[in-house]
Amino acid sequence: MSATSSCRICGDTVTEFIDFGKQPASDAFVKPGEEDREFFFRLAVGICGSCDMVQLMEEVPREQMFHEDYPYLSSGSSVMRAHFEGLAKRFLTTELTGEDPFIVELGSNDGTMLNTIAKAGVRHLGVEPSGGVAELAATKGIRVRKDFFEESTATAIRSEDGAADVIYAANTLCHIPYMESILRGVTTLLAPNGVFVFEDPYFAEIVERASFDQVYDEHFYFFTARSVDEMARRHGLELVDVERLAVHGGEVRYTLARPGARQRTAAVAELLASEEAAKLTSPATLTDFRERVEKNRDDLMAFLREQRAQGKRVVGYGATAKSATVTNYLGITPELVSFVCDTTPAKQGKLTPGAHLPVKPPSAFHADYPDYALLFAWNHAEEIMANEQAFREAGGKWVLYVPTVHIV
Ligand code: SAM
Ligand code: TMP
């Protein structure tokens, strides 16, 4: 019998289809000497038999993940900086052209998207519970409310600032289990003709690429057009547009509006039809996904053990939240991957969650190139490989494990 839980969207039964075992909070980098203070939970994913929402079986308390020391910075990738600047410019010429328009961003982090909006002098508010990153945005002149967005926050914003023409969230909505409160908040805050736009990893891409490392504590939901369509309808909203994005390993940007306020684009029907044709959430597809993930796990572990046996050195590149799942699912130790290099100041000098691999700045990588670099930040492969051309010129090789273990 598979484990079950209750769907956070519709209350029906969620049936587990993959289990990654005991895992730490993925962004909880550990100070050396504090290894015994870590929080663990069981990371497993299931699907709702009724609304099809793919979701974690266990919820991690939000304060364990989003706090003063939350280390992730949106500005850490030049590709993502350009992505957010492009979208902000698009909002400025489309949704934000009325009289005194207002945009609210959930999970505004260090202000990478709102920076362009603020510079254009448009009324905005970032809602960001993680104090350190919220402070970084504030120092750039961005208006930030240090808070979790939920129904009560939305009510307060509505009474202080009025209705929002755009509510936007990137890589944030899928992090929030308490969706009922969020969507009530959205309907409270959204202007009659406003749009709620959010972008998150697309479950179809995860299945296709067997990118199992997209599964970690912060990624509570794995959206599809079908499950978002259903979720929107249940909460008095309508899915009116979808757009596929190449960033972060393949995402979809969903646009929701009040029923009848916007014409639904053809792209919605197309994506819904493609999911149905692919039998995306059928038991056979999910079993095949699990089997491919287990093969990736075994192949990568065999590769790392082989390199150790041959006296070769492997270093990790990118101490991503995703890498917590990989290192803890496989049981990777510093004997197999000696350290992980990462540009994020708040991660350097610490140990990766659970697996306790030391995190060092890229200078440590440059000082003594390893034989192989295991690219945990595979979603930024082009950018990183271009910046690190000298590694390959020096004879180094990249190891990737999505969609299968391969050397570049
Ligand atoms: N939007 C940025 C991006 O795409 O780069 C940041 C994404 S980061 C992975 C997720 C962000 O959501 C974190 O900064 C976290 O603090 C924030 N967050 C988590 N729960 C939230 C909530 N209930 N309301 C607003 N922000 C939240
Ligand atoms: P993400 O995949 O969740 O965006 O995380 C990417 C991580 O990789 C983040 O900790 C920053 C790091 N990184 C580098 O160290 N060098 C780089 O060139 C890029 C793009 C990211």
Image (spheres, rainbow, N blue to C red):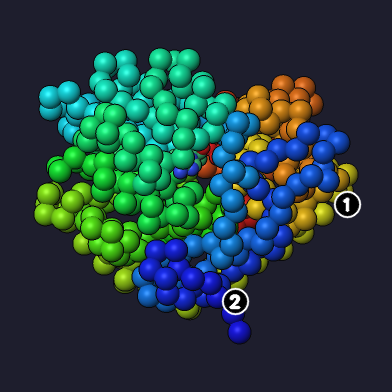
Q: Residue at x 30, y 46 (%)?
A: 186
Residues 210 and 322: in front is 322
User: Residue beneath label 2, please?
Assistant: 3
Image quadrant containing the N terminus: bottom right
Residue 108 visible in the shown view: no
Percent coordinates x, y for residue 325 in the rendering: 65, 53
Mark 2 surroundings within 10 Å by alpha-carbon count, few (fewer than 14), some (14 through 19), many (20 or more) = few
Q: Residue at x 66, y 62 (%)?
A: 42
Residue 383 location (% of width, % of height): 52, 31
- Seen at 45% across and 54% down, the residue is 178
Residue at the spot of label 1? 309
> Who is closer to the viewer here, 165 or 243?
165
Q: Secondary structure at mark 1?
A: helix
- Answer whether residue 9 is visible to the viewer in this image: yes
The image quadrant that residue 297 belongs to is bottom right
* Amino acid type, mark 1: Ala
In the structure shown, which secondary structural element does the residue marked by tag 2 occupy? loop
Image coordinates for residue 19, horizontal then vertical, percent: 63, 67
Quarter of the figure with residue 195: top left
> Which residue type does callout 2 highlight?
Ala
Does residue 304 sit above or below 127 in this rendering? below
Quadrant where the C terminus sits is top right
Q: Is residue 180 left or right of residue 324?
A: left
